[in-house]
Image (cartoon, rainbow, N blue to C red):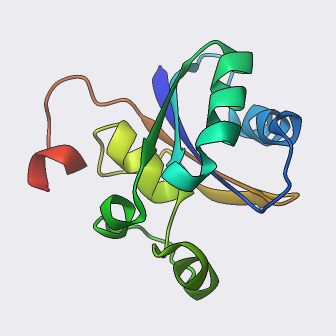
Amino acid sequence: MQVVVGIGARAGVEPAAVVAAISTVLQPNWRVETIASIDRKADLLAAVASSMGVRGVTYSARELSTVVTPTVSVRVARAVGSASVAEAAALLAGNSTELTVPRLCLDGVTVAVVELCLDGGPGVRAIL
C-alpha cells in the first residue's frame, strides 16, 4: 500500500526523532510516497524526506486550516495558525478524506498516515 505521512514536531526536534516516530507506525507492506507538513517545518521535512528517500511537501497554515480532521489542538492553532498539522497535511498530500493512522504523538513528534488516493476519488484537494 502506498502511504503519505503527515508530521508535526515541537521546536528543536531532530530529523532522526521524526524518522523514529514514523517507523513506529509503518506496516511492513506500506511504501511511503510522501512526507507532508506545515511550511514552517520545511527544513526538518526536507531532512526527513531526504533520509527516507521520498518526496516532501509543505502547506501553509491557511491551507491546513481548511481541512476537517478528527483531532484538533487549541495549542497548535495558537502556535501555528492551524488546529491540525500532521493529520491535515497527510490528508491534503494523500488526496484523501480518511486517515489510516490517526494522530500519534511520540517524543515531541506527531505522525498521521493516509493511504495515497490514486483514483481521483473524493480527495480533499477535489473539494477545496
Left or right of 94? Residue 126 is left
User: Residue at coordinates 64% horizontally, 12% vertically from top-left?
Assistant: 53
| Snapshot quadrant of residue 50 | top right
How many marks the image carries: the answer is 0
User: Residue at coordinates 36% horizontally, 36% vertically from top-left?
Assistant: 94
Q: Is residue 30 above or below residue 82?
A: above
Whole-percent x and y of residue 72?
Answer: 51, 77
Whole-percent x and y of residue 15?
Answer: 81, 36
Which of the two residues, 96 or 80, is positioned nearer the viewer here? Answer: 80
Left or right of 30? Residue 11 is right
Which of the two residues, 101 or 93, is positioned nearer the viewer here? Answer: 93
Which of the two residues, 42 or 128, is positioned nearer the viewer here? Answer: 42
Left or right of 92? Residue 29 is right
User: Residue at coordinates 87% horizontally, 34% vertically from top-left?
Assistant: 16
| Snapshot quadrant of residue 62 | bottom left
Which part of the image, by quadrant, shows the C terminus? Answer: bottom left
Residue 123 in view: no
